Amino acid sequence: MIKSLLSVALAAGLGLSASAAYAQTAASPTLDAIKAKGYVQCGVTGGVPGFSAPDSNNVWSGLEVDYCRALAAAIFNNPDSVRYTPLTSQERFTALSAGEIDVLSRTTTWTMSRDTQLGIKFIGTMFYDGQGFMVRKADNIASALDLSGAAVCIESGTTTELNAADYFAANNLEFNTVVFVDQDEVVKAYEDGRCDVYTTDSSALAAERSKFANPDDHIILPEIISKEPLGPVVRQGDDGWFNIARWTYFALLEAEELGVTQANVDDMLASDNPAIKRLLGVEGDFGTPIGLTKDWAYQIIKALGNYGEIYDRHVGPDTPIGLARGLNALWKDGGIQYSPPIR
Amino acid sequence: MTDIAFVRSEIAPAMPAPRRVTGILAWLQKNLFSSVTDSILTILAVLFLLWLLPNLYGFLIGRAVPPGGTVEQCRVENVGACWAYVASEIEFFIYGFYPMAEYWRPNIVFAMLALLGLPLLIPKFPFKIANAVLFFVVFPIASVILLSGGMFGLKYVPTEQWGGLLVTLIISVVGICTALPLGILLALGRQSKLPIIKTLCVCFIELIRAVPLITVLFMASIMLPLFMPQGMTVDKLLRALVGVTLFSSAYMAEVVRGGMQAIGRGQYEAASALGLGYWKRMGFVILPQALKHVIPGIVGNFISLFKDTSLVYIVGMKDLLEAVKTKNDAIEWAAPTQAISGYIFAAAVFWIFCFSISRYSRYWERRLNTGHKR
């Protein structure tokens, strides 16, 4: 009898400590520190147009910058509560693990070794980049499968070269390279007509194209032949902060899927759609359990718009970079951007 | 009656010099065509200039898009420099990410630097002591308060937002003003008879001189954060400042030591014989002579310090060159000659500063040249 009483008491004690543990995962030391100092410290690139670069008002702007602003909007209801630390690719992970920045949003490719060995966690893929091909419009090439025998300008000793060789071999195409040691030389050679094709990551292709005298004479082929998923990164060991970072990203995707935009977000508060009600905090409360407010997602969308709007604003077809959505379209539009439901 | 048939009563007019030694032809022959080799070199040089100058003119002026032009004008085949791009982004080159509404603050600092610094450099200008106090004590404090703000109702601007020429000037002025005194102390320490001081100075100087500046900065940006407790950080500008200053002070120490060793032993003995203590001996007799000898070396160090400031991109600071590099990728101004125009601008600014420093040092060499001319 006493034994069973003891075991009940023990079980109750365990249950208590277990629920205490749950409560602890919700609290995040990083979030507490951010709230105390009043801003999110965000690691960015030294300047990659469309992703993070100073705009014409000399303020940081870009797809990855807007992710940091979304975090600030979710936490402080103010997208401007962000400070930026430009980082070189060598120092980015040190800066993150040393706590100099709260989140690294810096064209970082998600790979297994980085994810598992550096004490960091990738949140998701903000931008699916990958190696693409650029050709002259006049050549009437519509697909990379038509490139057999074409002279390909390429930077030697890079993964770019290996990827292209693999792709040509796998598709039984004749691989004919013109090799240079420097990226600028590659671009110059392509521009001068020494080769028919220029290949590198598609975002870089677009940026280089905009520097040509006649950007419209060149097209980027739809094929992407390598995987370069670029995403924000946080430190390992603070699951509460990881949750906030991850669901900030998902909220941007969910908003686009539900048709909630910066312009109509206030009208959407009155929507009958239960998914929209949950997203905007009209029904249920998904913000408080992760340490934010009930209307966290509303604040993000009000400040920055949904994922599609952010994409179109910085790298979309109407910007000088001019990248089509491609893989970065939502799953229902033929892309692979997908958010688990908010419920 | 006189036998003298001819007496010159006035001086005969001087004959013109032979044609071979005066006039433009003679100058040409003497300087440009004095031998076959010279003639060939002259012709080649002239041909080179004939090829270079029109191209240079065409690129820099003729085909260039002047300030105020549009990006479409820059985006044509065979365009010259795109000065419109430089003019439109010049604020970023000067202030970096400093908030636009607060530009007046760095402007005041620039003005103070000019108004307090230039009189200090001109010997004729009076009130040197008051001026020095203002420049070395009041100016740095006022600048820090003005630039970073956070008090007196000024908006706080973290150093991450400082950039461009502003950062280049801050680092080089602070570096120049602290490296020389530090270097003199290190040089004295190295020659000291006190073993601990001597060893410390020798170790410091040799360690720093044996390591590239880029490594010191890498240490400051990558290793330092790992040693610090979690969440504690040292300001990046401060890291760069300390790195650059320590680095150039070690080089300065060796230059100063070279000057001191050029002073004859008699000077030391004479100073001692007068009953002067160590500091008076050094301050009044040895150093004034030693420093005079090594002005070219010291100024060489200043110039290389000024140019080395562009390495602070390693700690993520956007100095002038890095600001230009950042904007060279700006998509709004994407054009064939965008990057080269930016680099030419940066080079011109660096040249103006370095050339001014070098001319100013020539002036001091001449001024101090009291009977040591060799």
Image: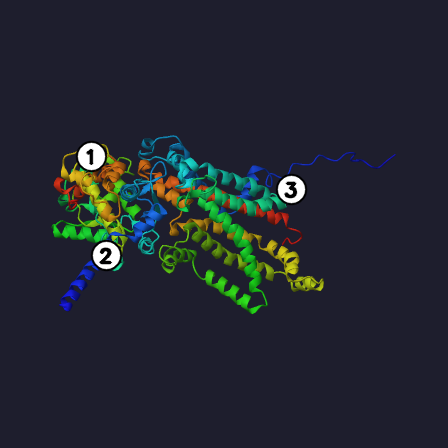
Question: Which residue is under mark 2?
Answer: A20
Residue A89 at what x, y percent from top left? 31, 52
Residue B230 at what x, y percent from top left? 35, 57
Q: Is residue B154 visible?
A: yes
Residue A225 at what x, y percent from top left? 17, 48
Question: SS class of the residue under badge 1?
Answer: loop
Q: Have a look at marks 3 and 2 and say if they share a chain.
A: no
Marks 1 & 2, CB-CB < 8 Å contact: no
Chain letter of mark 3 equals B
Q: Amino acid at mark 3?
A: Pro
Q: CA distance from mark 3 to mark 2?
A: 74 Å
Q: Is residue B45 visible?
A: no
Residue A192 at what x, y percent from top left? 27, 41
Q: Of circles 3 and 1, which is in front?
A: 1
On the image, which quarter does residue B94 sit in? top left
Residue at image coords 36%, 59%: B226
Q: Of circles 1 and 2, which is in front?
A: 2
State which quarter of the image contains the C terminus of chain A.
Answer: top left
Q: CA distance from mark 1 to mark 2?
A: 34 Å
Question: SS class of the residue under badge 3?
Answer: loop
Residue B235 in the figure: left or right of residue A8 = right
Q: Residue furthest right?
A: B1
Chain letter of mark 1 equals A
Q: Of circles 3 and 2, which is in front?
A: 2
Question: Which residue is under mark 3?
Answer: B126
Q: Amino acid at mark 1?
A: Leu
**Which is more toward the observer, B73 or A325?**
A325
| Residue B6 drawn above or below residue A110 | above
How crowded pointer 1 is (Cα within 10 Å; few <14, some 14-19, many 20+) is rated as some
Q: Residue furthest front?
A: A1
Question: Which residue is under mark 1?
Answer: A269
